[in-house]
Amino acid sequence: MKKLVYKYIHITKTYYHNYKARKKFDNDLTTFKSKSDSRFSINNEDNFPCLNDNTNNTGFDAHYVYHPAWATRIIKDINPSKHIDISSTLHFCSQLSAYVPVDFYDYRPANLTLPNLKTLKGDLMNLDFSDNSVESISCMHTVEHIGLGRYGDPIDPIGDLKAIEELKRVVAKGGSLLFVVPVGKARIQFNAHRIYSFEMILSCFEGFELKNFSLITDLGDFIWNANPEIVSNQKYGCGCFWLIKS
């Protein structure tokens, strides 16, 4: 019974919010038409109501704003001759290529054309690099999906572990791997992603030094050099690991 009441309240609030927003839109349109100059035509069929943008603050996806910003700062310090990125967000490789040559690999190649950027097909389960050959490589918010079939890849419960082994194999000795995955209480939310504990990730990277661990919390806060102990308190945090191969 309580669930039905809560659902009714939610629907009522949503309807009221949408009604108010639509009423404001109609009033704003009337005002705009009364003041508009002749540069543009205003026709009802061209209207494009945006009813949810009148907020006090600009919203953003904390995971996908902070983790590329974290990685970009580290790569600026590393200053590699070239950076390899495996299937991270396209916003990252496209902007990073402004000052570092980037080769971007994805299971589903991206048709993205920019100077200093190559976009190529790559399989994280079988990377086309020699052992110990890559000076600077990133794989961010990607491995948690491998083997779940979400992107057309084969179902494989340990696909993420196989992908990690490939990343470890290709990193040069002394080279850097920037690795980002969801962290918190370890579980799978099929077929979206896996969520890892801090200890699970460290145990996968024997032979690597953890140079920096930073965290985006459930509240959307970014913590540079975070205390790993707070990871267990997260439901869906974002763990950023800078790892150097010994």
Image (tube, helix red, strand yellow):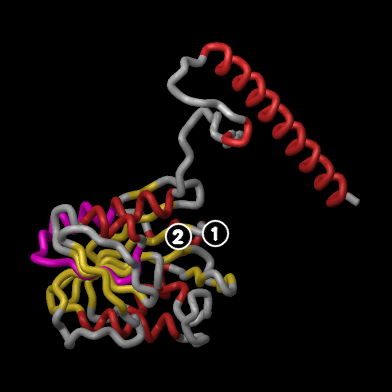
Relative to residue 229, is residue 167 drawn left or right? left
Q: Quadrant of residue 146?
A: bottom left
Which amino acid, by three-letter code, is at mark 2? Val
Residue tagged 2: 231
* Residue found at the far top of this picture: 35
* Disc ID at residue 90: none
Please name the residue shown 51% across and 59% down the image: 236
Is 186 in front, or is 199? Answer: 186
Gap between marks 1 and 2 measured at Cα? 9 Å
Which amino acid, by three-letter code, is at mark 1? Lys
- Can residue 123 be seen by looking at this rendering? yes
Residue tagged 1: 235
Please name the residue shown 23% across and 85% down the image: 128
Q: Quadrant of residue 231?
A: bottom left
Number of marks: 2
Reply above or below: 55 against 158.
above
Q: Residue 52: x and y, percent?
A: 59, 35
Reply above or below: 37 against 235.
above
